[in-house]
Image (spheres, grey):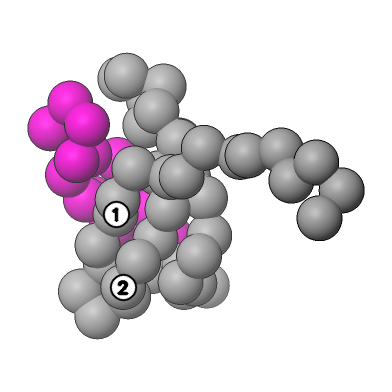
Amino acid sequence: MSTMLDVVCPGCDGKVSVRSTVMVTEIVECGECRGELEVVATAPVVLALAPEVEEDWGE
């Protein structure tokens, strides 16, 4: 069973709850600003604004 951790949103400083078993590169959503956040570290859990998906034009 995983526990929940509270992490600060880098976009709005709101509280984001994530599972203690979250993995690096996983995407979570802030419940306050609705921003997409990427997990960049797990010990401790660190969130960053997720990069925008860019079109690769078939490259």
Q: Position of residue 54 (x, y in %)?
A: 63, 39
Furthest-right residue in this view: 58
Secondary structure found at label 1: strand
Query: Where residue 25 sits: x, y (%)?
Result: 50, 65
Please state which of residues 5 and 24 is positioned toward the viewer in this rendering: 24
Res 22 seen here: yes
Q: Which portion, as a residue range, is magenta?
A: 2-19
Residue pictured at 39% horizontal, 28% vertical: 35
Please name whichever residue, 3 or 31, is drawn nearer the observer in this view of the structure.
31
The stretch drawn in magenta includes residue 53: no
Q: Residue at x 81, y 55 (%)?
A: 59
Considering only vertical position in the picture, is 37 above or below 44? above
Q: Is residue 5 magenta?
A: yes
Q: Position of residue 49 (x, y in %)?
A: 34, 42
Assign a secondary structure to mark 2: strand
> Mark 2 is on which residue type?
Ala
The residue wearing badge 2 is 41
- Horizontal arrangement in the rendering, residue 13 relative to residue 25 (left or right): left
Of the image marks 2 and 1, the number of the one nearer the N terminus:
2
Q: Which residue is mark 1?
A: 47
Is 2 located above or below residue 8 in the figure? below
